[in-house]
Amino acid sequence: MLVIVDTSVWIDYFKGGAHSPDLDYLIDENLIATNEVILAELVPFLKLKRQNRLIELLSNVSSVPMSIDWNNIIELQVKCLRSGVNGVGIPDLIIAQNALSHRCAIYSLDKHFRLLSRVVKLKCYP
């Protein structure tokens, strides 16, 4: 199963953070994926820092195609709100929808995905 690696994990990884060994494992096993939302969050900062090699490496990561179903996003948000899960932003809902529609897990340090996994059948790594 592919694992969509969220922005928070990449940032931790670039800083040599505590979660780097987990991401190293996923990279070694060729299990990582990204999408346009995550790249849109990462690449501008990397461009400002002139991290062209990192941008090139990220562009070679498997990309999960996106097709945003706004009605589904609205329903995800309604389910969250009914379950008492507040504050899940639209980008996180889009990433979750992307993972759900392609049967991928999500690796994130963002608590919203763990909360979402209690509301819908979203798989979180680890």
Image: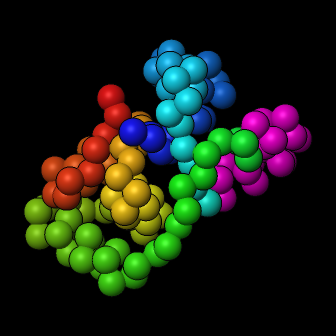
The quadrant of the image that shows the N terminus is top left
In the image, 76 versus 4, the foreground residue is 4
Quadrant of residue 16 within the rendered picture:
top right
Residue, x 44% and y 40% (percent of image)?
A: 3
Residue, x 60% and y 35% (percent of image)?
A: 11
Residue most toward the left? 83
Would residue 92 be visible to someone looking at this image?
A: no
67 in relation to 46, above or below: below
The location of residue 72, given as percent across then percent down, is 31, 77
Residue 54 included in the magenta stretch of the image: yes
The location of residue 74, given as percent across then percent down, is 30, 79
The quadrant of the image that shows the C terminus is top left
Q: What segment is highlighted magenta in the picture?
A: 37-57
The location of residue 92, given as percent across then percent down, is 42, 59
Residue, x 50% and y 19% (percent of image)?
A: 25
Quadrant of residue 75 within the rendered picture:
bottom left
Residue, x 48% and y 45% (percent of image)?
A: 4
- Colour theme: rainbow
In this image, 46 relative to 2: left or right? right
